[in-house]
Image (cartoon, rainbow, N blue to C red):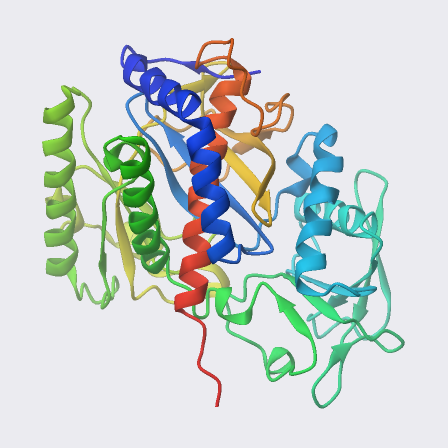
Amino acid sequence: MVPHLTTALSGPLLELERRFLDSSAQIEHWMRAKWQEHTPPFYSSCDLRNSGFKLAPVDTNLFPGGFNNLNSAFLPLCVQAAMVAIEKICPDARNLLLIPENHTRNQFYLQNVAQLVTILRQTGLNVRLGSMLPEITKPTPIELANGQSLLLEPLVRGEYRLGLEDFSPCAILLNNDLSAGIPKILQNLNEQVILPPLHAGWAVRRKSNHFAAYDEVATHFAQEIGIDPWRINPAFSVCRSINFHDRQGEECLAANVASVLETVKEKYKEYGISETPYVVVKADAGTYGMGVMTVRDADEVIALNRKQRNKMSVGKEGLEVSEVLIQEGVHTFETLNDAVAEPVIYMIDRYVVGGFYRVHTGRGKDENLNAPGMHFEPLAFETGCNLPDYAGGPDTPPNRFYAYGVVGRLACLAAALELERSTPELG
C-alpha cells in the first residue's frame, strides 16, 4: 500500500525519486563511507513529510516508541540489525536491562515495549524490564490488551552498576526519553554501557542541534548526487529565551518566523510553487507533539490568546517551554482513504527496519499529525526500504520507500553527528 500523492506537483518529487534510483550505487557507497566515520544511535525513528516538490524529515526520535506498529514481516530485519548493534557495543553481551517510560496505562506504548523485548531476546539476550516508577517495589506483572504480559521490576543501584535484585546486565537500553531530567539512579554508571547515551535524552538534547547537523549532512549529500539541498532539508531558526505566559521573546519569535517564511517564499517562487508557505513553531526539547503550532504570518505569534499561550508553554512532564524551533512547514500531500498521512521510518543501528504511516482524519496538509485522533497504518510498508526496483517507476512502493529510507538514513547520520558533538567531557 502506497498512499496516493494528491498533488499536481508530483512531477518534481518523481524526478527527485528518480535521481535517488539512478544514483543508488553512489548513494550506498557514500552512506557506507559515512558510517565508517560515525557511530549510529542504537535505534531511531524519523517523521517525514512528502509535499510532491520536497521530501524532508521534520522530527527524529532517539527513543522510538512504535515498534508495535511495524509490519510483522520486518521482525527478522529488526533482529538482524539489533544483533549488529549489540555486537558492536558489547560483543559478549548476555544480559540486557530495558528501562521503559513510566506509561503503565498506555497500552499502545506497552505493546511497543513487548515488541522490543521480542526483538532483543531473539538476538540471544536475556532481557528484563526495570522500572523507575517509585510504586514498583516488587516484580509487577502488567497485562496487555493483545494477550501478552510484561513484568516490571524495581531497579537496584550499586556504586557503579544498575540492575535488578538477581540480575546484573552488561548493557542498559533506555526506551525513556528523560524529559524530566536525568535521574540520579542513572548517573555515574561507570561499568555499564547505556544506550542511547544519557545526553540523547531531552534533558540535554535540542532539536535545533539535530537540524543544524542535518543541514550539514543534507548539503554534503546534495552535492554528491547533484540536487538542491532544499529539496530534502527544511529551513529553520531558533529562539532561546521565550516565556509564553509573560509574552517574553515575542519579538524574537516574530522576527525568526518572518525570516524563515521569507526563505521559503523565495524557494517557492524559484520552483513555481503556488502553495502557501508556513512554519511550525515547536518546543526545542520534547516529544509527543506537545508545544506545537502552525504559523502562516509573523503577526500570528504576537497575537496569541491565553489558550494558545498555555498550550505552547508546557511540554511533556509539565516542563516549561523556554526555547523553540521555528521550522519550515512541509506540506504532506499523501493521503490514505482521504485522510492526511505522513511516513515514519524506523531504524536500528544504520539499517532501515521498517516504517508505517501516521494518519489523521481531522488534520490538514499543513498541520501537525502527531496529535490526539491520529492512528497508524502498520501494514503500509509491504516491502522494505532497502531494495529499489530498477525496472519500476519512481512512485511504485519499493521505490517510494527507498526514497523514504534514504532521507531517514540521512536523519540518522545527523543524529550520530549531533550525539558526537554533544558528548559531555569526562573529568
Q: Nearer the viewer, residue 17 or 139?
A: 17
Q: Nearer the viewer, residue 214 or 10?
A: 214
Residue 286 image offset from top left, x and y in percent: 44, 58
Task: Answer with left or right where residue 151 lies relative to residue 380.
Answer: right
Q: Nearer the viewer, residue 245 or 321?
A: 321
Among the 4 quarters of the image, the one containing residue 204: bottom left
Among the 4 quarters of the image, the one containing residue 22: top left
Q: Residue at x 71, y 90 (%)?
A: 159
Among the 4 quarters of the image, the one containing residue 395: top left
Task: Answer with left or right where residue 389 lies relative to residue 34.
Answer: right
Q: How many marks?
A: 0
Q: Residue at x 30, y 28 (%)?
A: 54
Q: Residue at x 76, y 67 (%)?
A: 130
Residue 163 image offset from top left, x and y in percent: 78, 75
Question: Taking the image as drawn, is residue 339 in sight?
Answer: yes
Q: Quadrant of the N terminus?
A: top right
Question: Taking the image as drawn, is residue 286 in sight?
Answer: no
State whether residue 406 is above or below residue 109.
above
Residue 124 image offset from top left, x and y in percent: 85, 53
Task: Answer with left or right where residue 245 lies relative to residue 39.
Answer: left
Q: Residue at x 58, y 63 (%)?
A: 196
